[in-house]
Amino acid sequence: MFRVYIAGISSYLPENCVHNNDLSETLDTSNDWIVSHTGISYRHLAAEHESPSSMGIAAVKDVLQKTGIAAEELGMILLSTTTPDYAPIPSTACVVQDAIGAKNAVGLDITAACAGFVYGIELARAYMQIHQRPILVVATEMLSRVTDWNDRKTCVLFGDGAAAAILLPSPDGERGVVESLLKSDSSGKDVLKIEGGCRTSTSHTDNIPLTIFMDGKSVFTFAIRILPAVITQLMKNNGLTIDDIDWIVPHQANYRIIHSAANRLGVPESKFFINVQNFANTASASIPIALVDMEHRGLLKPGHKIITVGFGAGLCYGGNLIIW
Ligand code: COA
């Protein structure tokens, strides 16, 4: 059977690690509130000299070195970001392509918010059925640049970070992506947005800064509904039960969302990998950053069955069932 597998994965996190108590020095918030409402303690924030592409490139260089794939061998670069280097052209994928010298690749950005890595894996799987060449899937997010740092309802939630994965044809037809579900419920397109695009500018003299807007309660309600639904559907489609699944790797948005999904599914929380406490919500980079974290902790073994679930603005969502 033709399958596509993740041959290597790396992440990059900016050096500057900020604790909740650092935020409460300048903002009307507290460590207690943030931890009790989100589970977040720390987030990494990019330095002035960094950009979404520079973070992505750092992760890409590492994964190329790890897998022994030369940049010239890449057939495609799929880059997920909600914070492109430019708004919106050239694509950040093309910026990365140029920097690493992947001259035989096609570069394409994915706009699927926090579901972007899940979408990227499936798009890579589909493209590779025709062009069987290595594909790089990158997720890089610098939400600190689009956050209103006076808005305590949003700014405490996000962090910066990047990750990159090399996808190859599966060596044994067993390891790899078994199935993906990709969905979008655009009736919720207004509950999570980055304002400041052409629709919100009224003339060429406008210079509206990009700023994230979120109706937190609506996003919460959506997330706790779709997280169990995606997991259940992927298991059902493949004749699996929760006992067959080694790990669920959800988008790391908020501990309470994961806790609630585990309760609704009747699954022990220990099935879910959770590291939101250390990195906050890094949008589409959160799932691959979690996978790297799991590898570092020795939690992922070849043959493990894992389900990823991403969800975010759009409202885009979906999941991948992967044999590691
Ligand atoms: N520190 C202290 N107080 C805060 C605060 C902060 N950082 N943020 C909000 N508050 C206050 C509010 O002002 C409000 O005060 P009030 O009752 O005096 O008006 C109170 O806390 C409750 O606010 P509310 O917005 O009702 O909190 P909540 O329980 O809904 O939690 C979220 C807010 C954002 C944590 C929650 O809605 C959530 O997790 N949503 C999903 C967000 C998400 O994951 N988005 C990304 C998806 S990809």
Image: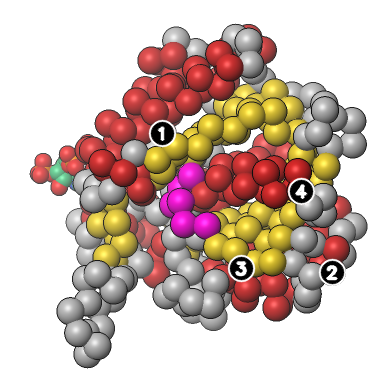
Q: Residue furthest front?
A: 130
Q: Is residue 146 magenta?
A: no
Q: Residue 29 location, x and y as percent?
A: 24, 52
User: Few, some or many C-alpha atoms within 10 Å of disc 2 (few <14, some 14-19, many ≥20)?
Assistant: some
For marks 1 and 4, give the CA distance: 39 Å
User: Few, some or many C-alpha atoms within 10 Å of disc 4 (few <14, some 14-19, many ≥20)?
Assistant: few
- Marks 1/4 in contact by CB < 8 Å: the verdict is no
Q: Amino acid at mark 3?
A: Ala
Ligand 1, image quadrant it occupies: top left
- Marks 3/4 in contact by CB < 8 Å: the verdict is no
Q: Residue 145 location, x and y as percent?
A: 39, 70
Kindly report which numbered mark, 2 or 4, lies closer to the viewer in this rendering.
4
Kindly report which numbered mark, 3 or 4, lies closer to the viewer in this rendering.
4
For marks 2 and 3, give the CA distance: 15 Å
For marks 1 and 2, give the CA distance: 40 Å
Q: Is residue 295 above or below residue 88?
A: above
- Inspect this view and state whether residue 296 appears: no
Q: Residues in magenta?
A: 110-115
Horizontal side, residue 248 vs residue 114: left or right: right
Q: Which residue is mark 2?
A: 72
Which residue corresponds to the image point at 50% horizontal and 17% vertical from the top-left?
232
In terms of depth relative to the viewer, which is nearer, 37 or 162?
Answer: 162
Kindly report which numbered mark, 1 or 4, lies closer to the viewer in this rendering.
4
Q: Amino acid at mark 1?
A: Tyr
